[in-house]
Image (cartoon, helix red, strand yellow):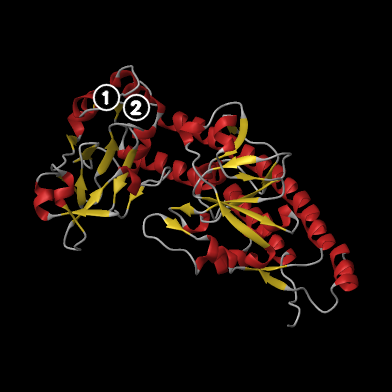
């Protein structure tokens, strides 16, 4: 019998009461703290956006501060309070929380709630991550693009309230498990990073060519054209399904290869003022993370932040061209030709001028087969280390949810 079972047998043999959060505490909305108010020293402060990006289950110190004069006018959390981000574009991140366990007070921004309660602080924070909480929370989220939850809605969510000694034992176990999980993930992440570096070395070696392989300007063996944007663009946007897919950088995953869908469409009139790409064509970002290639699986239009590459099949296997465009040899030419400065851009002439090798079709297909296998080991979530990372996280989540589940005390 575990220590938790022993405590429950002694202190709650008939079950654990489940209470609404509003019955065990109060919600206070933060106020007035903007990102521009954050400083590197002063009075401890937490902006709601930092709960999404910086803080975990709990924190005893802040990454940011604000001036004491402003802090006096702001809503402040006390040690033991939960600080909850109330908005996000992602439902899963709505009501992400951290327990403030530092000494003294901390200023809290708007779009965050302070939950002052009578429970073990980290027990409540772990509960806010649990499946039971997520299931209840989902019913109360509102809003369209920006999703949010109110204090009244949070107050209706039910939490199991075991004896305080049980709450502390659960926190002790989950803290240990979380630390072990973090150490294991760090080891796996390091191994995965090493595997990626090994892949990069292997890819560069395979893509390297000897002096007998012909080399040409990319523009001689492909068609390269810049995208175009109808102006003003909002005039040509449509929600009608007869519209043409409008390809934006946000439609492609960071490490993805293919463009399969778009979030927006343009009218047929707008499409005529833009540039079509067809399934199998490449699109290449010409600003921001410039030079990153993607293969379109749809017919759509690209704006002037993209370049289109087509008519290459007589010379290149599509998958070989994808790996070639990502190679250090080609990317270094992009870097050099794009020039110095904060904002660097590719244009069609630059991409046409890049010198590339043209090995035999058999050699291209061999390189693709080898790189596809190696790439799967580092990127496919169902293979190798990424799958192990995913399994570790699922194991932790299952164990946490089991610890936070109790037989309910009959009313």
Query: Going by the picture, which residue comes out furthest to the bottom?
Result: 411
The circle drawn on residue 304 is none
Q: Secondary structure at mark 2?
A: helix
| CA separation in Å, label 1 and label 2 | 7 Å
Dot 1 crowding, Cα within 10 Å, few <14, some 14–19, many 20+ = some
Q: Is residue 338 above or below residue 207?
A: above
Query: What is the quadrant of residue 404 in the picture?
Result: bottom right
Instruction: Name the residue tied to disc 2.
Output: 330
Where residue 208 sits: x, y (%)?
A: 41, 27
**Left of 39 or right of it: where is 314?**
left
Is residue 214 or residue 326 the one in the foreground? 326
> Residue at the location (50% across, 61% down)?
150
Is residue 26 or residue 161 the one in the foreground? 26
**Left of 234 or right of it: where is 57?**
right
Instruction: Name the residue tied to disc 1.
Output: 354
Is residue 154 among what the camera can see? yes
Where residue 123 sits: x, y (%)?
A: 72, 57
Quadrant that contains the N terminus: bottom right
Are the residues flagged by discs 1 and 2 in contact, CB closer than 8 Å? yes
> Residue at the location (60% across, 54% down)?
390
Q: Is residue 179 above or below residue 351?
A: below
Q: Is residue 63 above or below residue 353?
A: below
């Amino acid at each position: 019998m575990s220590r938790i079972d022993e405590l429950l047998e002694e202190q709650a043999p008939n079950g654990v009461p489940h209470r609404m959060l509003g019955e065990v505490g109060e919600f206070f909305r933060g106020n007035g703290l903007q990102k521009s108010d954050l400083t590197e020293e002063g009075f401890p402060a937490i902006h709601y956006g930092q709960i999404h990006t910086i803080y975990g289950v709990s924190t005893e110190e802040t990454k940011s501060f604000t001036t004491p004069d402003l802090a006096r006018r702001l809503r402040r959390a006390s040690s033991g309070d939960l600080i909850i981000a109330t908005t996000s574009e992602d439902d899963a991140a709505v009501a992400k929380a951290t327990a403030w366990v530092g000494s003294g007070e901390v200023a809290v921004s708007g779009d965050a709630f302070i939950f002052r309660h009578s429970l073990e602080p980290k027990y409540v924070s772990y509960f806010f991550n649990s499946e039971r909480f997520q299931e209840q929370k989902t019913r109360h989220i509102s809003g369209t693009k920006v999703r949010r939850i109110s204090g009244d809605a949070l107050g209706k969510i039910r939490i199991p309230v075991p004896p305080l000694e049980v709450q502390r034992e659960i926190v002790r176990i989950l803290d240990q498990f979380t630390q072990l999980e973090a150490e294991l993930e760090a080891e796996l992440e390091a191994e995965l990073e090493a595997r990626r570096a090994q892949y990069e070395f292997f890819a560069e070696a395979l893509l390297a060519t000897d002096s007998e392989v012909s080399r040409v300007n990319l523009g001689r063996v492909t068609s390269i054209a810049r995208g175009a944007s109808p102006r003003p663009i909002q005039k040509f946007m449509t929600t009608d399904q007869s519209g043409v897919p409008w390809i934006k950088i946000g439609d492609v995953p960071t490490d993805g290869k293919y463009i399969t869908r778009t979030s927006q469409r343009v009218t047929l009139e707008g499409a005529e003022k833009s540039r079509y790409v067809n399934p199998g064509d490449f699109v290449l970002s010409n600003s921001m993370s410039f030079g990153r290639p993607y293969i379109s699986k749809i017919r759509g239009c690209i704006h002037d932040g993209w370049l289109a590459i087509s008519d290459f099949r007589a010379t290149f296997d599509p998958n070989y061209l994808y790996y070639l465009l990502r190679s250090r040899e080609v990317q270094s030419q992009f870097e050099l030709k794009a020039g110095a400065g904060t904002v660097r851009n590719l244009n069609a002439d630059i991409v046409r001028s890049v010198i590339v090798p043209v090995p035999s079709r058999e050699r291209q297909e061999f390189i693709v087969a080898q790189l596809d296998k190696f790439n799967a080991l580092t990127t496919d979530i169902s293979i190798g280390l990424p799958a192990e990372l995913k399994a570790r996280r699922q194991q932790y989540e299952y164990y946490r949810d089991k610890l936070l589940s109790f037989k309910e005390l009959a009313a």
